[in-house]
Image (cartoon, rainbow, N blue to C red):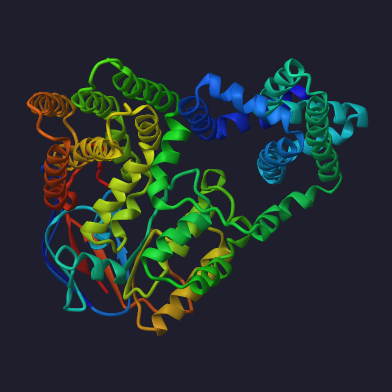
Amino acid sequence: MLQITDFKKSYHGIPALEIPYLLIPKGIHWIKGSNGAGKTTLFRSIAGMIPFKGQILLEDTFEVNKNPVEYRLRVNYGEAEPNYPEFLTALDLIQFVGKAKKASEKQMFDLIEQLEIGSYVNNQLGTFSSGMLKKTSLVLSFLGNPSLILLDEPLITIDQKAIENMFRLVQTYQKQGVSFLLSSHQEFKVDEFTISNTYWIENRTVVLKN
Amino acid sequence: MTSILFKVLVSAYYRQNAGFFLFLFIVAFGLFTGTQHVQLGRYAVHFFPYLAMIYGTLWVLYTLKVWIFIFKSFANSKNEFLYLIRLYSIWDQVKSLALVQFSLLQPIIAYGVFLVYLGIEELAWMSVLGIFFIFAFLICAPVLLYLRLLKSPNSGQNLPGLITLLPIKLRITYPLFFSFQLLQHQKTLLFLTKILTCFLITGVCLLYKTDQYDERLISIGLLLAGISLNFMTNQYHSFEQSKLLLIRNLPFSSTKRFGLYALAYGLLLIPEYLFLVRYLPKELGYEIAFQGAIYLVSFVVLFHMYLYFNPSNPEKSGKVLFATFFFNLVLIMFKIPVWILSITMLSIAVLLFRKYYEKVEYENEFFVN
């Protein structure tokens, strides 16, 4: 599903992450690592949000830099600690991202309903709590027809009800063939789906540890 | 109670709408001269029914904007304490709310006073009376609605539903994101810069009015305006880096991304375009204004794209900015048409964008998780 080759990411000359080769199959995968290990760096690289050296290939066809539009249509990212322009309403942002990701209006409003943000979707993001922002970012990450969804620390700042709603969505999307990379410090104790593989980020690289 | 209402409602309203008033100010005083305002006013007070229809509609729309703001403020959970004003006597509530409404209507009331003054001068007593009645209504009717809102706290929550009934759905689209960001966080700097650039453009247009006009003056004025507006490019990068990183995950082609940035800057430069068109010397055609507008946006876009190549060295950026200014100035003096300069700058901007957009690493990009 996702093939990472000769991956190198440095910050101002200091190596942060190096992955000679990694093949991630379809499924739901858990990326673990201590604080500062490089989970967000890996996710943002896969999402095409930060520069790196190497190649990231989706479904043997779409390379993040060579096919930027097709690749980004298929890879969505939910941020760990989302920060958005305060003057926008959640609906402004959802409609902007949804249109770009070719999501239908129905899908947008279904997700708003399923993640229960309908009561404040017309409010400005500047008035949101961290939990409300996180739920908004989760809505954004499910928009369109992705093949891979990256959820960075999806369990933080949201309540138990929201976690259950999100797990239900993950299960629904998985049944439609969508793969997930989830990063979390907390254990995923869920009945809705099973974790296919667990990867650890240690010593500045990613290793499979089932 | 009144001082709290002023802090929570009146100050917040004017703070939030600084951009709206800036736009009105630029349109009102940039496009019309004082004499034209007086002529328009005199005409209006002489034809009271038309005055009531045209001005009245605009004033009602403005009052509606204020009314929506108040309802939203009451609906905001942070302002729940405002409902405590019900504990005061009804007379105190009415007095404070009327004062708040009066303060929020100040921009239109000021214009109304101007019309009343003209009405008295022209002895158009019906118009003067009509204006008093309209403003009495615009202050009293909303106060009654606010009192009703205080009695039924949840009615404010229904406002989004009410707004959806309006025929127009107002959404902030991406090309306007940065304008709103500046209006919210850099309004003073933006306001002062806009005053400076609009004065610059007006100044060069009005220079040597009696002689044959040398269009190079306009190009130099626009070049100086471009330099003054350069602070926006750093702000734009910083804005996307901190608040809109997700833009890089969106499936936009390079052409579309470039076009969106150019459009965002183009919209921000509307006041400069309006001044350019308004004060353009009569002997010059509007194609000169069009070329000037493209030239100004090219200059700003070039620097936005240059920052992808050099995002973290302001000293070097300053030198490049000065060199670009100097070369442009020399080429303008040698009568190189601005459309050639615009095409050259846009071409360099496209090259920088295509080569460095995906590779840019910002100084504040930190090692995360």
Q: Residue at x 81, y 31 (%)?
A: B130
Using the image, determine if residue A91 lies above or below residue B186.
below
Marker count (numbered): 0
Please tell me in which quadrant of the rendered image residue A3 appears. bottom left
Residue B275 is situated, as x and y percent measured from the top left of the image, at: 38, 29
Is residue B270 in sight in this rendering? yes
Using the image, determine if residue B194 lies above or below residue A80.
above
Q: What is the quadrant of the N terminus of chain B in the image? A: top right
Is residue A15 in sight in this rendering? no
Residue nearer the viewer, A157 or B284: B284
Residue nearer the viewer, B160 or B209: B209
Please tell me in which quadrant of the rendered image residue A140 appears. bottom left
Residue nearer the viewer, B195 or B66: B195
Residue B228 is situated, as x and y percent measured from the top left of the image, at: 28, 24
Locate residue B114 relative to residue A144 in the image: left or right. right
Q: Which residue is drawn at 28% across and 38% down?
A: B293
Q: Which residue is drawn at 38% across and 49% down?
A: B175
Q: Which residue is drawn at 70% across and 56% down?
A: B162
Residue B43 is situated, as x and y percent measured from the top left of the image, at: 66, 29
Locate residue B21 relative to residue A32 in the image: left or right. right
Residue B57 is situated, as x and y percent measured from the top left of the image, at: 70, 42
